[in-house]
Amino acid sequence: MSAPLLSIEHVAVELPTPRGNLRAVDHVDLSLAAGRTLGIVGESGCGKTMLSRAVLQLLPKKAKLTGRVIFDGEDLVRLDAERLRRLRGRDLAVVFQDPMTSLNPVLTIGTQLMETIQEHLELDAAAARKRSIELLAAVGIPAPEQRLAQYPHQCSGGMRQRIAIAIALSCEPKLLIADEPTTALDVTIQAQILDLLAREQRRRHMAMIIITHDLGVVAGRADEVAVMYAGRVVERAPTSALFKRMHMPYTEALLAAIPKLDTAPHTLLPAISGRPPDPTRPLRGCSFAPRCRYAAGRCHEAKPELKGAEMPEHLYACFYPIRMAEGIGA
Amino acid sequence: MLNFVVRRLLAILPVLLAVSLLTFLIASLLPGDLALVILGDQATPENVAALRRDMGLDQPLWWRYLSWLGHVLQGDLGRSFRTGQTVLQAVAERIPVSLQLMLMAEFIGLLIGVPLAIACAARAGGAFDRFMTGSAFAMLSMPSFLTAILLIYLFAVELHWLPATGYVPFTEAPLANLRFFVLPALTLALAEWPGIMRVLRSDMIATLQEDYIALAKAKGLKPARILFVHALKPSSLTLVTVTGINIGRLLGGTLIVESIFALPGIGRLLVGAIYTRDLVILQGVVLLVACGFVLVNFIVDMLYAVLDPRIRHGHA
């Protein structure tokens, strides 16, 4: 097998806070082959955004990053600023969560598109303009030529996210990181944006990381899913295998917390009770144990390793994975 | 945009009216009888009464305000009873001096303050930032008469590079004129840049936290482009306000700096009018300066719209 496009090796991110160091990302290993899609799922504060910022090298200044992020054969963590700059926007692109804040309010859409193109590709203004118009058309923006002269506030949220995607796609990146690309949008727009991302990914044969709190978003779209909890990857599997048989109780709880159409009105949503552990305190045992309905004594004592049992590509970090739960939970 | 300009202009009218009323009241309600001032303390009561009648001082206050306002609206701001010069003449004679001083001071202030602010914000919390923030605070607490004296001592007395006092019109001797203005403008600029720097620095730091700056970095743009194109423009709204206020303030001349450097500007005109109780000049100059202030603020509002398209389109 050839080397993966992206390989996250033992990445940990710590943020200094007044209460002590906060473990935002706790030794994560992930890899992604060219043209494939990885979904990273977890609730707010589980470290998924910090992990994506670690890949992009856009962590807050005070954050401490250890481990390696090998992208296309180079370790981004140790890459000098100028090489990193040439890589970003060209081979490595990102779409942020909130299109209302991720576009510069005082620059026209044309400027924001063309500056990326002209920074990385050797195109003159006219060619960059032509390419911008093509990109806007490709992401489904009507009358793209008029849009170039407009400012972000003249576009709707969905439009803006399409523009952000056009910017991300502008230099044919090898990897696109979409950090909750639909969370800030209307439900009616969400599917459109996700379909747009999937279509452009296939067309351009780029790899993609979709970060979301919604298992439903990755269900039909990711090749592989990594579930994060309290800074760690707690289950990782090919998407079909995961949805066929999930092993980690947290994944199950996450899925159960998605509202379904066929539940009767006014029934309580099975939310996950309790809160994630305080990431500034040292942790003994499984981080999900305090909220887990299957947890036994051992879960509070030792930290379960992320490993595969019967299927080598289906990894989970649990002593009592769900298939054996009947015997213990009762 | 046109709609925005008209809205702003309409908002100015009541302000101008209030300004005129206040100016009039300040001058009229000052203790002491103007007629007595003019005639001196040897005047007979009959003469004083006659002059009061001539000047309309025996009329009720509201009537005097309305008739003054009527004259003002026709461009007649009155005439100094000492020199016989009209207010407009006196101001027209001196405004170039104050204007030049203001422009040079503001220019130097921005020239010092803006690059320092950007440098500080780019490495906020670093050694350079801490040093400059401290220096700015020290400069801010230095009174301008002290700065002026120190500058005169250094550049005029010790180094003999620049003249300490004096003035020639620009049209007569441009180079000499500029030399006369360097020290007073620098004195004012040294008081201006700390404010400029602190305001822009803190706005820049806030802007650099924005998502769109993170995206600009993720797009692989050059650091200079991120700072100057993506961060500077959205950070400069407060800077424009501060600069506008400074300009408005300096438009009225600076009493201290103009006096120290013997520049015949608006500030000296005002001081003279106060000493000689030349109320007509005082009233007229204050009114004109206040109108200038309002005008500058109007221009600042227009600049907002240029800087931020959301204001232009009536979104924010």
Image (spheres, rainbow, N blue to C red):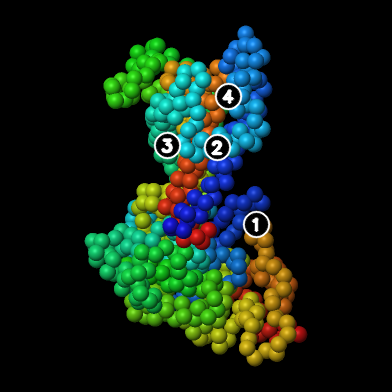
x and y, in percent, of residue B238 in the image? 51, 45
Question: In this rendering, does residue B108 appear at all?
Answer: no
Circle number at residue B110: 3
Q: Amino acid at mark 2?
A: Leu
Q: Could you say where residue A96 lies in the image, as x and y percent from the top left?
A: 48, 66
- Mark 1 to mark 4: distance in Å? 84 Å
Dot 4: element: helix
Quarter of the rendering containing residue A255: bottom right
Element marked by disc 1: loop
Amino acid type indicated by mark 4: Asp
User: Mark 4 sits on what residue?
Assistant: B54
Residue position for label 1: A280
Pointer 2 and pointer 3 on the same chain: yes
The answer to which image quadrant residue A246 occupies is bottom right
Residue at (62, 11) in percent of width and height:
B43
Q: Pointer 4 and pointer 2: residues touching (CB < 8 Å)?
A: no
Labels in figure, total: 4
